[in-house]
Image (tube, rainbow, N blue to C red):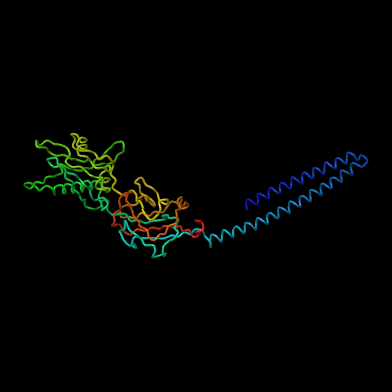
Amino acid sequence: MISWTTNNNKNIIISILIILILLGGYILKSNYKSINNENEDANSKDIKNELKLKYLLESFEKSIMKSTDSLIKFNQKAIKSGNYTNLRNELFTKDVIKQKIITDSSHKINGNNADYKIDLSSTSNTYKNVIGFRLIESVIPLPAHNINSSNNKIIVEHYDDNNNGHEILVHINEGFYTFNEIADRVTTDIIAAVNNLYPPINGVVYFTRDKFNILPEPNNDDIGNKYRYKIVRQTNDSNNNLVPVQLIFKFKKTGNNFYKLLGFDNIDEDIDEVRNEYGTNFHLLAPLVPIQHIQYLDIVIPEIPTSSTKLTTYGKNIIDRIFINAEPSESVVYRVPESEVHTTNYFYPIKLNSLSIKILMDGTFPIDPLVQTNYFEFEITMLKNTKLMN
């Protein structure tokens, strides 16, 4: 309709120019006759010319008004026709349709509340020609404990008096602990695990807090007035002199988030490097401020093509990242930002029979599987007019 209107505007302008040219020719011709016919009365000629000019202008005005009226009527009909077409397409002959579905982990066909599968065929006989998928809203209860099945294990390597290393898998008792309580809990459980390797001699246990201890340590440095842990690792040699380090942490080998509880990087310590770092002080501040609560949750659904996901620095394709704004045992209520609601990333049509939902804690490890039922609302976009694929 825009093209039609533009062409008619050009025609009107050309018509006006032609009329003006004819009018100018008429005036010149009249003036020419006036000069060569000196016997006619000049005043009479002027009056006649003015009358003719007035008549011509009135006729031109009527023609313009008639053309304008016709154009307005045509545009009104075109607009009505366009609105009808749009309305018909929106209500009856849509190219795509959107369907919102609500899932909850209590309806899972397998898995636990942190990693489970939902069967969609029971509600819709399978979603076909799916070309878009997004998370709209979710409600996820948080674990009640900050030490739980997601981070309650740590592999340590203990070196005996002959400098032989022994790896030990230590289980930390689950629960909700304060900053000071975590230090005491971890120390107690590690000492107990090491002593299981060495029977008491004359009732005296081998590994004690004199040799290994985790202590809360206020720290005022360039990262601010924060608390970090001081790790004490020492023993006595054959001459009863203090020597550093009998025990190191294998954070990376453990494969969970335990390293964050103490404020370490996710690495495996090397005995020689740690001994050199300790020097003669026999203690070392953990390099980072501990993180003892969940920071965010990543939602992973493998069935969804990568073009509708977000890529993390961990190399995982996620549906969305949910930042935590609630306390342990409370529920995180999340709704997608409005700026994302009006965007769409389409992908090649797929059939969607089920959804495998994984909830990852801080981007890498599954959240505690004992969390309560969680809920998700998703929007599925399906291609109805399959001719568009041709």
Q: Residue at the right extreme? A: 39
> Is 272 above or below relative to 193?
above
**Residue 62 as seen in the image, left or right of residue 353:** right
Q: Give the number of marks.
A: 0
Q: Farthest residue in the front direction?
A: 390
Percent coordinates x, y for residue 322 in the rendering = 37, 51
Name the one closer to the observer, 66 or 226: 66
In the image, 290 versus 385, the foreground residue is 385
Give the residue drawn at x 55%, y 60%: 89
Q: Position of residue 184 (x, y in %)?
A: 20, 47
Q: What residue appears at the point 40 percent right and 49 percent down from the top-left corner?
A: 310
Q: Position of residue 44 (x, y in %)?
A: 89, 44
x, y (%) of residue 304?
40, 54
Q: Residue at x 29, y 36 (%)?
A: 221
Q: Quadrant of residue 282?
A: top left
- 211 horizontally vs 351: left or right: left
